[in-house]
């Protein structure tokens, strides 16, 4: 099952509420996106992979560590069966980011049809080969425009949130890559990516009236999601 079109990433926009997570899925389906994407990890998996030291600002000044952020941002494993069920109810295909082998095994049990690898993990060649070996399509974000064997590459410029996207850089990247992974609040850059030939555009989303507690500056609203897809509606 190949991925194309607009991918809505829930990330941590549910703010720890399963009911909010269901609301996001319903809103994304109503907006006419093509795929819903989750992030699947256990906090200790990311601590082992990336470290659990001081968090970036503004959280470092508040005494947060990366371990704290991973716990706060996590979509709990036990949510996945009901999230998948909700996606099936609203007719919205889903897939997930994956970071380490244990969560990959969990997603395989759940029948995950596609896997996404993060830009930070471009150098994890052994794990990428393990994911490719599942036989499922694999998408890889990359900060540098490049071909990576066996995966669909999304250009993901540095920054969280990303700085203003240079229009010529975006145009050039959509010639070399399969799509665009966007971390920002405007629907315009991902819409331009589609205009310039992106097969896949990934955006982080949040409800208009309940923004992400951790990364509202990296998410577009559901209203802007409607502007991206061109489907009337919004204000969810």
Image: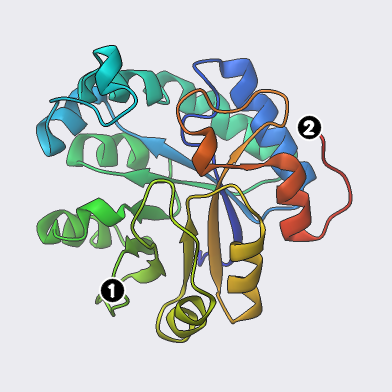
Residue 167, placed above or below residue 120: below
- Label 1 environment density (alpha carbons within 10 Å; few <14, some 14–19, many ≥20): some
Residue at far right of view: 232
Q: Nearer the viewer, residue 122 or 224?
A: 224
Q: Nearer the viewer, residue 96 or 227?
A: 227
Residue 228, placed above or below residue 91: below
Q: Left of 81 or right of it: where is 56?
A: left
Q: Nearer the viewer, residue 228 or 62?
A: 62
**Does label 2 or label 1 sit earlier along the sequence?**
1
Q: Look at 52% across and 20% down and name the residue there.
A: 15
Q: Look at 48% across and 50% down and name the residue there.
A: 183
Residue 233, placed above or below residue 46: below
Q: Position of residue 12 (x, y in %)?
A: 47, 29
Q: Look at 78% across and 32% down and name the residue there.
A: 236
Distance from Cα at disc 2 to Cα at disc 1: 37 Å
Q: Left of 110 or right of it: where is 227?
A: right
Q: Position of residue 213 (x, y in %)?
A: 51, 22
Q: Quadrant of residue 56?
A: top left
Mark 1 secondary-structure assignment = loop
Q: Which residue is mark 2?
A: 236
Residues tagged 2 and 1 counted as in contact (Cβ below 8 A): no
Q: Which residue is mark 1?
A: 150
Q: Position of residue 136 (x, y in %)?
A: 37, 60
Q: Quadrant of residue 20?
A: top right
Q: Look at 50% across and 43% down and name the residue there.
A: 218
């Amino acid at each position: 099952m190949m991925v194309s079109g607009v991918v809505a990433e829930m990330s941590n926009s549910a703010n720890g509420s399963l009911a909010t997570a269901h609301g996001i899925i319903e809103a994304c389906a109503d907006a006419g996106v093509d795929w819903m994407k989750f992030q699947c990890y256990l906090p200790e998996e990311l601590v082992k992979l990336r470290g659990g030291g001081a968090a970036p600002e503004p959280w470092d000044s508040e005494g947060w560590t990366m371990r704290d952020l991973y716990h706060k941002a996590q979509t709990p494993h036990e949510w996945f069966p009901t999230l998948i069920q909700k996606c099936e109810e609203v007719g919205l295909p889903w897939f997930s980011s994956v970071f380490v082998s244990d969560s990959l095994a969990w997603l395989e049990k759940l029948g995950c049809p596609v896997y996404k690898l993060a830009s930070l993990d471009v150098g994890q060649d052994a794990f990428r080969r393990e994911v490719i070996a599942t036989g499922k399509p694999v998408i890889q974000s990359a900060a540098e425009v490049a071909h990576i064997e066996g995966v669909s590459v999304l250009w993901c410029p540095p920054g969280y949130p990303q700085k203003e996207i240079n229009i010529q850089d975006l145009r050039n990247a959509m010639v070399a890559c399969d799509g665009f992974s966007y971390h920002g609040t405007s629907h315009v850059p991902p819409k331009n990516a589609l205009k310039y030939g992106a097969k896949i555009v990934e955006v982080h989303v949040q409800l208009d009236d309940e923004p992400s507690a951790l990364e509202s500056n990296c998410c577009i609203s559901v209203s802007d999601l409607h502007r991206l897809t061109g489907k009337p509606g919004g204000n969810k």
